[in-house]
Amino acid sequence: GATLGVMGGGQLGRMFVHAAQRMGYFTAVLDPDADSPAGRVSHHHIRSDYLDPQGLEQLAAKAQAITTEFENVPAAALEQLARQRPVAPGAAAVAIAQDRAKEKAHFMKCGVACAPHAVIETPQQLAAVADNLLPGILKTSRLGYDGKGQQRVATREELAAAWDVMKRVPCVLEKMLPLAYECSVVVARGQDGAMVSLPVQRNLHRGGILAITEVYDANVPAAAAQQAVASARAVAEGLGYVGVLCIEFFVLGDGSLVVNEMAPRPHNSGHWSIEGSDVSQFELQVRTLAGLPLTQPRALGPSIMLNLLGDIWFRNGGEQVPPWADVLALSGTHLHLYGKTSARVGRKMGHLTVTGASLEQVRSTARRCAELLGIDPF
Ligand code: ATP
Ligand code: MG
Ligand code: MG
């Protein structure tokens, strides 16, 4: 049978492998870690650094087409692979998504509004920052995730000090916006340019990390939902993107929409789609990679996803297994654990999706689960 390859062995790779295997594919995972969440469920696990030409050679020899599951895969690795095999998304699109300054320039090019911001790469640029960007958030242009590599700054003095703490690496200063709520859209674009998208996801972040995603009819006003989908499609189209792309948005008090960032892969806020949609974001990734047709996904009913961070293992002091049996005793609960060897505070260990016939029922079950697991009420 055909083999699909993936760069990276984290939980997103693991769920991609599950979807690929269900559809009859073999899989090959490249990850430096001997015991990665995706590597241990894959047919082939190539243990190699992402830039090691031999490892990449092995992956290209095994896989007919290759995708990526983490944002920071080196563009040079994708370029080497692309000389031998179809790679989706391509190195150029991934390179833009990896860099906040390039990403924002791309959004503006596509006519999609983003937060007022300034690129800070030199002391001159720091000095020239407009006062109206403060208070703001200083974000490293590269390698940040889950709110890491970010610092909130209220004054020019704090801004200068924060940039020093970040060792003066290239950064973007974003104006702090008054968010009413956040949402995201997962879009898939095929080799032929056909596009489909998952329903708009309404997201609650806590401490810079996604905590809860809710998907149900009218979870966001129709005008905002339409604008989010249109913007996500414009961004994917503008990149000539092939694969699954997630765009995060801020919705402001007046209902206007501002794009935050994009991820060139399936996204945590789309995990609900495994049980909550007739086609999941991981099946979309398989389909785009294998050149299979895309059909517009349809939500099967309301879904709420709770992220399971390492914190809940430590809520009574020492490490303790959370009460899974109590959660699984409630109908409509779908538990995903990523098989990570150790729990740490802030680490994504798994997620729980709750599905059901009505929003009331799904909400009440999800709230009960949160209570059982020690997740803050929502
Ligand atoms: P991810 O894990 O999603 O890649 P990240 O580290 O790239 O996260 P961002 O998405 O930039 O971080 O920011 C994390 C969260 O911080 C946002 O979802 C939002 O809640 C808040 N935030 C970020 N930028 C702003 C802003 N300009 N104004 C207000 N809140 C913001
Ligand atoms: Mg990010
Ligand atoms: Mg984000």
Image: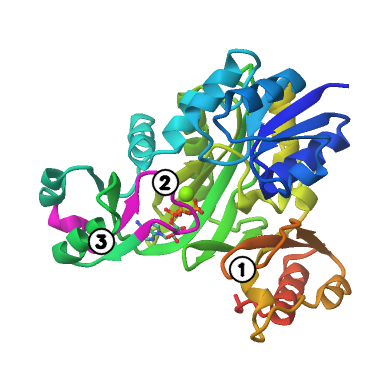
Occupied quadrant, residue 64: top right
Whole-percent x, y for residue 310 in the image: 64, 69
**Quadrant in which the N terminus appears:** top right
Q: Which is more N-terminal, label 2 or label 3?
A: 3
Disc 3 crowd rating (10 Å Cα; few below 14, some 14-19, many 20+) is: some
Q: Decide which of 53, 368 is in the foreground and name it.
A: 53
In the image, which disc is placed on residue 344? Answer: 1
Specify how the rendered protein is coloured.
rainbow
Whole-percent x, y for residue 240 in the image: 51, 22
3 and 2 marks in contact (CB < 8 Å): no
Numbered range of the magenta stretch: 130-150
Q: Decide which of 172, 365 is in the foreground and name it.
A: 172
Residue under pointer 2: 259
Q: Is residue 375 left or right of residue 3?
A: left
Nearest to viewer (mark 2 / mark 1)? 1
Residue under pointer 3: 162
Occupied quadrant, residue 170: top left
Helix, strand or loop status at disc 2: strand
**Quadrant in which the C terminus appears:** bottom right
Amino acid tagged 3 = Ala
Whole-percent x, y for residue 96 in the image: 42, 32
Q: Which is more N-terminal, label 1 or label 2?
A: 2
Q: Separation of disc 2 and disc 1 at Cα?
A: 31 Å
Q: Which residue is rendered at x = 63% and y = 23% of the image?
A: 54
Q: Decide which of 31, 301 is in the foreground and name it.
A: 31
Q: Which residue is rendered at x = 72% and y = 59% of the image?
A: 303
Q: Separation of disc 3 and disc 1 at Cα?
A: 26 Å
Amino acid tagged 1 = Arg
In the image, which disc is placed on residue 33? Answer: none
Q: Is residue 207 left or right of residue 330?
A: left
Nearest to viewer (mark 3 / mark 2)? 3
Occupied quadrant, residue 332: bottom right
